Image: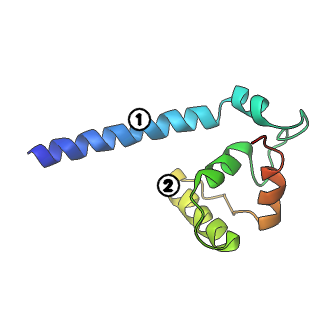
Amino acid sequence: MVIRQLFSFMKKTSTFIFDVLKNEINNPELVERYKISKEHFTITRKQAFSTTLLFMMNFLRKSLALEIENFAKHFKFFIGNAKFTGFSKSVFVQCRNKIQP
């Protein structure tokens, strides 16, 4: 019984954390605050600001190409975006350079 309650609490907590994170990452004020130029991230391309942040928050352990491939698989599965095709190393580096540290 206690384990079931603990699991339920953990599930609710993780759902709450993901909801808060999703709201913060998609917040237009956050994008405006941390992009380097007003022209950056104005058009929706292969890699949006939120996708770049999520990938940067993913603790990279392998080569960039493998991490991008794994991220794309997880993104499709967990987010449910079947149209997401991933992105290249070059696209990631270009987007990363458009975000203030």
Residue at screen point 83% across, 50% down: 97
Which image quadrant is residue 14 in? top left
- Identify the disc placed on residue 101: none
Work out whether mark 2 precedes mark 1 in sequence or the reverse, and give the earlier one. Answer: 1
Are the residues at dot 2 and dot 1 in contact (C-beta closer than 8 Å)?
Answer: no
Above-or-below relation of 10 to 81: above
Placement of the C terminus among the 4 image quadrants: top right
Q: What is the x, y in percent for residue 53?
A: 66, 47
The answer to whether residue 64 is left or right of residue 73 is right
Residue at mark 2:
78
83 horizontally vs 95: left or right: left
Question: In the image, residue 32 lies at what x, y percent?
Answer: 78, 29
Residue 41 lies, with reference to residue 29, above or below; the image says: below
In the image, what residue occupies the spot 40% across and 40% down?
15
Residue 100: image x %, image y %?
Answer: 78, 40
- Front residue (pair 53, 76): 53
Q: Residue 16's spot in the image, x, y percent? A: 41, 35
Tag nearer the camera, 2 or 1: 1
**Which residue is labeled 1 in the image?**
16
| SS type, badge 1 | helix
Q: Residue furthest left?
A: 1
Q: Residues within 10 Å of mark 2 (few under 14, many from 20)?
A: few
Amino acid type indicated by mark 1: Phe
Q: Which element carries disc 2, helix, strand or loop?
A: helix
Amino acid under disc 2: Phe
Location of residue 69 by image quarter: bottom right
Q: Please determine whether, in this image, residue 54 is positioned above or below residue 90.
A: above
